[in-house]
Image: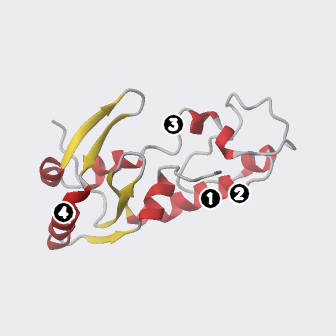
Amino acid sequence: MTTHHPTSLRLVYGHAKNHDCLAFADADTAAGEAADIRALAAARTWGEARQVQMTRLWNPARPGGYEDEYADDRPFDITELGAIVDGDWPKMVTARALAVLPQDLQDRYGEIVLTVHDGEYLKVSLGGEAALVAELRERGYEVTRDDDLINLLDGVGIGW
């Protein structure tokens, strides 16, 4: 088993609707990623979408994708992006726990689930929230719950 080392002592977490479990993300990068997602979702045309400058994520509307044939003035609908339709963008938020939670807490509170297309993620039961958050705080983590942010990072609700 690979040992994962947390990258930040600041975490944001919440109820990830897509997998009905808790998801954890690095609070130092989450807001920037959410801003990238919102900026792309706000584009009105394909030309605007291609020009969106991302600070944390890659822009799936950039040239090189199979949407290249769309004219710059064509109305943009983020839900038409192949990377979103295929579930490749944004990356599955529940997979982040594998990088940001200490290994022993992953083992105690989570269960690794293997998906067919997106690899593995850590399923952390909603019932373990209080104990896990308490243990993280005892270890010096700053932990904040934000369901909306977690679900935005998972692509829930963008463009709908």
Q: Amino acid at mark 3?
A: Gly
Q: Which residue is mark 1?
A: 38
Q: Which residue is mark 4?
A: 132
Which residue sits at x=58%, y=62%?
35
Q: Sort mark 2 into few (<14), some (14-19) or many (20+) by Cα contacts within 10 Å.
A: some
Residue 85 on image: x %, y %: 59, 35
Q: Which residue is mark 3?
A: 87
Q: Amino acid at mark 4?
A: Leu
Which residue sits at x=40%, y=49%?
93
| Mark 4 vs mark 1, CA separation in Å | 30 Å
Q: Which residue is mark 2?
A: 42
| Mark 2 vs mark 4, CA separation in Å | 36 Å
Side (left or right) of 71 relative to 84: right
Residue 81 image-quadrant placement: top right
Q: Nearer the viewer, residue 154 or 66?
A: 154
Residue 155 on image: x %, y %: 52, 49
In terms of sequence position, does the residue under pointer 2 or pointer 4 come before the other? Answer: 2
- Helix, strand or loop at label 2? It is helix
Which residue sits at x=25%, y=51%?
124
Q: Nearer the viewer, residue 155 or 21?
A: 21
Q: Residue furthest right?
A: 73
Q: Amino acid at mark 1?
A: Arg
Side (left or right) of 120 relative to 130: right
In terms of sequence position, does the residue under pointer 3 or pointer 2 come before the other? Answer: 2
Asked if disc 1 and disc 2 are in contact, CB closer than 8 Å, the reply is yes
In terms of sequence position, does the residue under pointer 3 or pointer 4 come before the other? Answer: 3
Asked if disc 3 and disc 2 are in contact, CB closer than 8 Å, the reply is no
Residue 44 on image: x %, y %: 79, 52
In terms of sequence position, does the residue under pointer 4 or pointer 1 come before the other? Answer: 1
